[in-house]
Amino acid sequence: MGTNRRYADRIDRQMDERILATIAAKGGLQSLSAAELALDREQLTIDPEPKPVLAWVRFYGEAVRVRGFACRWTPKAVGVKFTAGGKEYTTWVWSDAVELDQEVRPPSDAEKYGPQ
């Protein structure tokens, strides 16, 4: 008997979200340092329409891939906003750790503009 792939994908995504929420609840989201960002020397782009991305972020050194939005970037780094366990996070990662999300979904206002 076969498996309904549509439901399997949904269950896989729910499991990924639960794992991310568990890891995020421990705290310790890491971000690039001010020296690494070099915002005083690098050109900063702030996007009024954040792009949906998949990004590798770190919690206490544990790498996790998240779905989020690229809100700003420099030639070397990307500012990523994402939600885990109902809490919103913002972090800077190296640009090589980010790629456009092929399963594009429209961002909510909270994801685009942050808490009001």
Image (cartoon, rainbow, N blue to C red):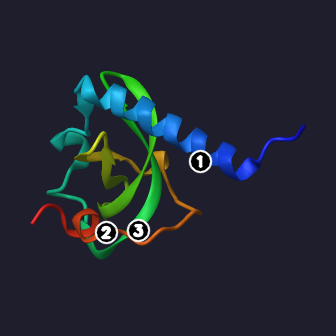
Eyeballing the image, is 114 above or below 20?
A: below
For mark 2, does the 10 Å Cα neighbourhood hold few (<14), some (14 to 19), or many (20 or more) residues? few
| Residue 75 showing in the rendered view | no
| Quadrant of the frame with the C terminus | bottom left
Q: Label 2 to label 1, Cα distance in Å?
A: 20 Å
Quick check: 2 left or right of 85?
right
Tell which circle, 3 or 1, labels the residue nearer the N-terminal end.
1
Q: Position of residue 81 (x, y in %)?
A: 29, 54
Q: Secondary structure at mark 2?
A: loop
Q: Residue at x 34, y 55 (%)?
A: 78
Q: Find disc 3 in the rendering and name its residue.
A: 51
Residue type for callout 2: Ser
Q: Residue at x 20, y 68 (%)?
A: 113
Q: Label 3 to label 1, Cα distance in Å?
A: 23 Å
Eyeballing the image, is 7 above or below 1?
A: below
Circle number at residue 108 = 2
Circle number at residue 10 = 1
Quadrant in which residue 43 is drawn: bottom left
In the current view of this chain or complex, which residue is farthest to the bottom? 48
Q: Label 3 to label 2, Cα distance in Å?
A: 12 Å
Q: Position of residue 58 (x, y in %)?
A: 36, 31
